[in-house]
Image: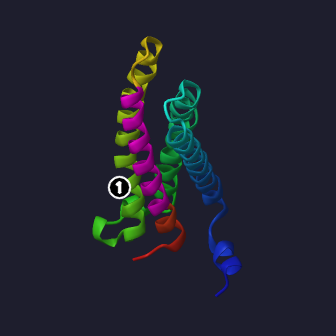
Amino acid sequence: MGLSMLAAMRPDSWNFPLLVHAFGAMVAVGGLVTATAALITAKGEARLLRLGYFSLLAVTLPGWIVMRIGAQWIFSKEGWDDLPDRLVPSWIGIGFLIADFGGIVLLISLIVGGIGVRRMRNGKGTGLLRATMILAVVLLAAALVAVWAMAGKPN
C-alpha cells in the first residue's frame, strides 16, 4: 500500500490538528537550531549570546507550546487516549516523553539564560549562557530523536 493510499485513509478531521502539531514542531526545531548556532559561535560576543537566548524565548518556546497543544489534540482525535497505555505505540510514548521532558529543560534554560542576559549588563553572565548553550544542544539532540520517532514510527 503506497503512502498516498495511507494518507487517503486518514479522516479529514485529523488534518488540522496534525498540521498544528507539525507546524509547532518545525518552529520549535528551527528556533533550537538558531539558538544553538548563535550560542555556539558567540565566543563571548554579547550580540550573538542575546540572539541565542531570545531565539529560545521568542521562537522555540511558542513553537513548543503550539507543538504540544497539537500533539495532545491529534492524540485525542485519533482515539489513542481511549486505549490502555500498553496498546499505545512506542513512537507516541517517545514523542510525549521528549516533549514533556524537553519542555522542562527548555524552561530551565530560559531561566538560566535570562539571568545570564541580565548579568551581561554588568559584564558577567557568559557562564550562565554557556550552560544555556549546553541545554540547547541537549534539546536539539532530543528533538532530532523525536523527529526520527514521529517519521519512522518504530515499535
- Determine whether 70 is above or below 79 in the image: above
Residue 101, position as x, y percentages in the image: 34, 48
Residue farthest to the bottom, as pictured: 1
What is the x, y in percent for residue 70?
Answer: 53, 49
Residue at horizontal 57%, vertical 42%?
Answer: 31
Q: Nearer the viewer, residue 15 or 96?
A: 96
The residue stretch that appears in magenta: 126-146
Magenta stretch: dominant secondary structure: helix
User: At 56% from the left edge and 39% from the top edge, which residue is drawn?
Assistant: 38
Q: Is residue 105 left or right of residue 7?
A: left
User: Is disc 1 placed on a helix, strand or loop?
Assistant: helix
Q: Residue at x 62, y 69 (%)?
A: 10
The residue under the point 36% across, 30% down is: 127
Give whichever of 66, 84 is nearer the camera: 66
Residue 149 percent coordinates (x, y): 46, 67
Examine the structure image and report whether residue 140 is included in the region drawn in magenta. yes
Above or below, comparing residue 107 to residue 1 in the picture: above
- Which residue does the numbered mark 1 point to in the structure image? 97
What is the tally of numbered marks visible in this picture?
1
Q: Circle 1: is it few (<14), some (14-19), or many (20+) Cα within 10 Å?
A: some
Which amino acid does the dot numbered 1 rest on?
Leu
How is colour applied across the structure in the image?
rainbow
- Looking at the rendered image, the quarter that the N terminus falls into is bottom right
**Front-lying residue, 18 or 102:** 102
Name the quadrant containing residue 154: bottom left
Tell me residue 40's x, y (percent).
Answer: 50, 42
Would you place residue 61 above or below residue 140 in this image?
above
The image quadrant where one finds the C terminus is bottom left
Q: Is residue 75 above or below residue 49?
A: below
